[in-house]
Image: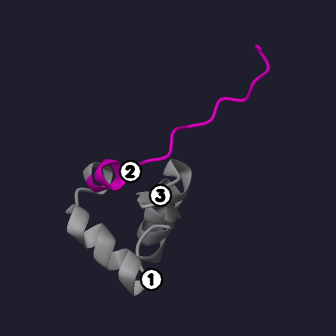
Amino acid sequence: MENVSRFERLWSVEDVSAYLGVPVKTLYQWKWRGEGPPVRKLGRHLRYDPAKVRAWVDGLTEAA
């Protein structure tokens, strides 16, 4: 199984909070308002694609 693609683990709310340096509560508020990095709900849990979070941050710096 050497040819199996390696997938990066999805990030939890706590992971994104640490990466962005914002409180977990802020991420939940952003989701509720339709703001912030793209997020998916898997069951009861929010999960973030690390590449999309990084792209969202890059978009913020380009817009500034």
Which three-letter amino acid code belongs to the residue tagged 3?
A: Val
Q: Residues within 10 Å of mark 3 (few under 14, many from 20)?
A: some
Residue designated by label 1 = 34
First in sequence: mark 2 or mark 1?
2
Q: Is residue 24 magenta?
A: no
Q: Nearer the viewer, mark 2 or mark 3?
A: 2
Which region is colored magenta? 1-17
Q: Secondary structure at mark 3?
A: helix
Q: Quadrant of residue 21?
A: bottom left
Dominant SS in magenta:
loop
x then y, percent, for residue 20: 30, 56
Q: CA distance from mark 3 to mark 1?
A: 14 Å
x then y, percent, for residue 58: 48, 61
Q: Residues within 10 Å of mark 1 (few under 14, many from 20)?
A: few
Answer with left or right where residue 5 lies relative to residue 38.
Answer: right
How many marks can you see? 3
Q: Secondary structure at mark 2?
A: loop
Q: CA distance from mark 2 to mark 3?
A: 11 Å
Which three-letter amino acid code belongs to the residue tagged 1?
A: Gly
Which three-letter amino acid code belongs to the residue tagged 2?
A: Ser
Residue designated by label 3 = 53
Q: Secondary structure at mark 1?
A: loop
**Is residue 10 depicted above or below 47 in this figure?**
above
Give the residue drawn at x 49%, y 49%: 50
